[in-house]
Every structure is written in structure tokens, then in C-alpha cells.
Image (cartoon, rainbow, N blue to C red):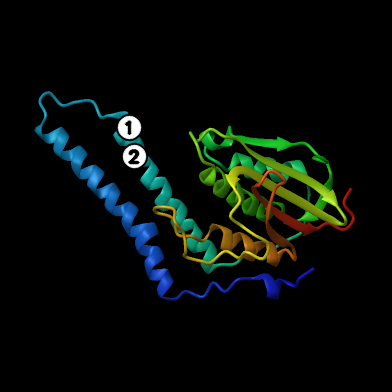
Amino acid sequence: MPSPSTTTPSLAPDHGLARALVQGLDTPLSALRATMESLGYELEHSAPRPALRPQRLDGVLREVERLGKNVRELCDLAAPPVPQALACTLEEIVRAARAALPPEQRERVLIARSEAQATIDVDGPLVSQCLRRLLENALEATPGSGDEPVLVVARCEAGEACFTVVDAAPSALGPGWQPVPFQTTKPNHLGLGLSLTQRDVALLAGRLEFLASGAGQTCVRISIPSKGAR
């Protein structure tokens, strides 16, 4: 198994951080400001005052949620966690990751109950956070109408606890592919999710692997040492 030092990506801020801040923070703030100004003008110049349009308010809330998520990712980047071993089951880890998603995304996550009750000693909250990032990435990458399911499988094998996320997106990730911090094609994202996941998995002495399923779908797996799984 590779040592954490060989799998941890370099996350030192550089000029890419400035671009990421513009894309991840300034752009959603500008969109939020424009939406609020439009709502203010509409309320001021309409008689009688119209009811606020739900879709407009939904847009505001989405921008606020995205901004908060970007800030949390920057905080995670600045303060790497210190893993602590806790007794937890595979099912507890997977369900905690699923529960951290918004309701509309949570409903699309299918859980395979393979060895769900197996207990391991690991930093369960940290593994759940890593898994939650993978689920978010898979849910956003899945093409189509946005209601396609994403599958997560948890099982113990060969002395490791493995958490695999499979989505319907055609795989563009080959063996050896590595995430690059602050590089993303998604609007208003920082491009840190996979890099932070790789860093945190390495802190757990584990591996993050980017694969393809037999059907050519995207498949990402977290493998964590689990000696004495029970």
C-alpha cells in the first residue's frame, strides 16, 4: 500500500487559489447580489406588490448554499484533520454520508447492504465526509434529467474496508488519474472536493482509486485498512 506521503497531493495555495476564489466565492456573490437587486426593484416598482416568486427565492438559496459549501472547503483545506480511531459499522459510515446530502440528492443514493454491520476501528466521521464528497461529485456528474441513482457499496475484503461509488456518467478517469486542486469545469465550484478527499484518505493510511465499471461507468473507491474487522 502506498504511504500517505506518496498519495497526498500538493495543496499549497498559488495563483490558482485566486482563480478559485473568483469562481467559487465572487461569482456566486455577484449572482446573489444581482438577484436581490432584481427582487428589490420588482417590489419597489410593482403595484400592488407581487408575491415573491418561489423560483427566484430558490435561486437565492442555492447561491447561499453554494457559497457556504465553498467556505467550508477552504476551511478544510487550511486545517487538515487529525484522524481518531472509533468503533463504527460500515452502515453507520454510509448512512451518515447519505444523510449529509440535501434531500433531493439523498433520494438518489442507493445503498448496497454488503457486510453493512461489519465493525471497524476508524475515524468514522472523517470517512463519512470523504464518502459524502464522492457522492456529491457523482450526483453532479450523472447526465440526464438529474434523477439517475448513484450506487454506494460498502464491504470488508483483504483486511480493508472498501467504499465504492458508481454513477451513470461515462468514465473519463483512467488508472493513475489524479485530481488537481482548484481546477474544475463546474460553475461556482472551487475544485477541491476530490483533492481534499484524496488528502484525508491518505491521512487514514488508505487509498483513493478512480476506476471504470464493467459497463464503462465511473467508479471511485476508498480503501481503508481495517485489521480486526468484526
Q: Residue at x 29, y 35 (%)?
A: 56
Element on which disc 2 rests: helix
Q: Quadrant of residue 19?
A: bottom left
Residue most toward the front? Answer: 215
The answer to whether 146 is drawn above or below residue 71 in the figure is: above
x%, y% of residue 37?
19, 44
The image quadrant where one finds the N terminus is bottom right
Q: What amino acid does circle 2 point to?
A: Gly
Query: Rounded to the nearest whole Å, what is the CA distance between mark 1 and mark 2?
Result: 6 Å
x%, y% of residue 43?
16, 33
> How many badges with numbers are in the image?
2
Q: Which residue is mark 1?
A: 55
Q: Residue at x 51, y 45 (%)?
A: 140
Q: What amino acid does circle 1 point to?
A: Gln
Q: Residue at x 50, y 62 (%)?
A: 75
Q: Quadrant of residue 150?
A: top right
Neighbourhood count class around disc 1 (C-alpha, 10 Å): few under 14, some 14–19, many 20 upward: few
Q: Quadrant of residue 226?
A: bottom right
The answer to whether 186 is drawn above or below residue 81 in the figure is: above
Q: Which residue is mark 2?
A: 59
